[in-house]
Amino acid sequence: MSSYFKNTPDRKGFFGEYGGAMLPPPLVPHFKEIEDAYDRLSKSGEFLNDLKYIRKHFQGRPTPISYLRNLSKTSGGAQIYAKREDLNHTGAHKLNHCMAEALLAKHMGKTKLIAETGAGQHGVALATAAAYFGMECEIHMGEVDMKKEHPNVVRMKLLGATVVPVGEGAKTLKEAVDSAFGSYMGQADTALFGIGSVVGPHPFPKMVRDFQKIVGTEAREQFIDMTGELPDMVAACVGGGSNAMGLFSGFIDDEDVSLHGVEPLGTSENLGDHAATITFGEDGDIHAFRTLVLKDADGNPAPVNTIASGLDYPGVGPEHAHLHKIGRVNYTTATDKEALDAFYQLSSKEGIIPALESAHVVAFATREAKNHPGCSILINLSGRGDKDLDFVVDTYGFEK
Ligand SMILES: *Cc1c(COP(=O)(O)O)cnc(C)c1O
């Protein structure tokens, strides 16, 4: 095992000073049960073989790496490559951890999966996993998001999930998290909370990272196969940070590979107009763990808003806060406008329509390519843009 992963996180779930589990007392034994089960199953040949089978025969792994020839040419300088997580079943990297969480729940004897969803992508992935394993699924979603992301509500229902509308407060992601957590508290004996990124209380940031590691493991081998060497730069967009941790995992011990996380800068640097938590946040607690948080004047999690709802979270995975602090990963931003330009460019130049989340890292690659002639940049194309088509075309038309 690599040196980094051996000690990170520590036994209490801390990545340096970030992470941990600040749980309401009734949930402490349930999280201990999850931690013990994961410790045992992560070393079980049967569990790992089941996961391998699912990834190959249901999810469509391994996903390829594509060399983006035309984009590299027009960006002028570096060679750009993309790990194609958009080719996963359901269209994003999320199934990597959702299938594994469901498999864990199954092994623990649970019969139900509960979660919140913002744009609906996590809800769809978890509902897919629940259907595969014949489990019940309960997804909490803000009423505002339900209207905005109606096709995903339809998908979840078709997949057999119960969608619980949340009408409190701003009726979006934060209220959905509170609602889902409340419901889980009442049924933690029979249900597992399926957290959607490398966030939440220990052991989720570690577990979800481990489940996403497959992205980096495949990518490292594939990249060497293709080019004979390691990439110079590896980059991914960061919301909670799961697709980024997945890809970074493959290269974290390669000191010569620089790692870059791209946060959404939205429409301006003013609080409320972006979700660049690492860039502008401060130490704090959110959803029962310690990390960097975007705070309002009262010290509460601030409102966030960008073109990519999958990146709209006023916190970030504790491991990213740690990797920022120790300087192993460089965190930077891309604006809504840069992401949109990249969305159109990748579509028309490469024949790949990216998710607006992933478009942020495409923007980073085209921007950095100019500054790094002769280098190679490997990005994580975390998802495909089908879900964003109507919004983009209705709002901005067919080209910029
Ligand atoms: C959900 C989502 C993200 C953001 O989640 P991370 O945990 O930061 O990876 C990024 N890209 C796509 C396509 C998503 O669906």
Image: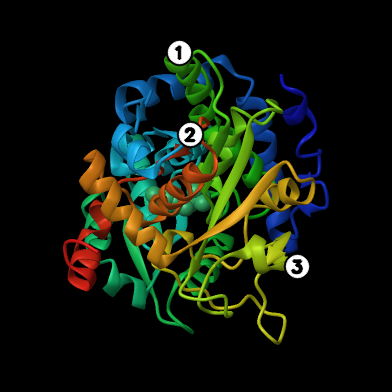
The answer to whether the residues at label 2 and label 3 have Cβ atoms under 8 Å apart is: no
Taking depth in this image into account, of 85 and 359 the one nearest to the observer is 359
Between the C-alphas of marks 2 and 3, the distance is 32 Å
Q: Earlier in the sequence, mark 1 or mark 3?
A: 1
Quick one: SS at disc 1? helix
Taking depth in this image into account, of 285 and 192 the one nearest to the observer is 285
- Write down the residue under mark 3: 284
Q: Earlier in the sequence, mark 2 or mark 1?
A: 1
Quick one: SS at disc 2? strand
Q: How is the image coloured?
A: rainbow
Quick one: SS at disc 3? strand
With respect to residue 363, does 79 lie above or below?
above
Q: Earlier in the sequence, mark 2 or mark 3?
A: 3
Name the quadrant containing residue 300: bottom right
Q: Badge 3 local density, few (<14 within 10 Å), some, or many (20+)?
A: some
What residue is at 59 percent from the left and 27 percent from the top?
250
The verdict on label 2 being within 8 Å of ligand 1 is no
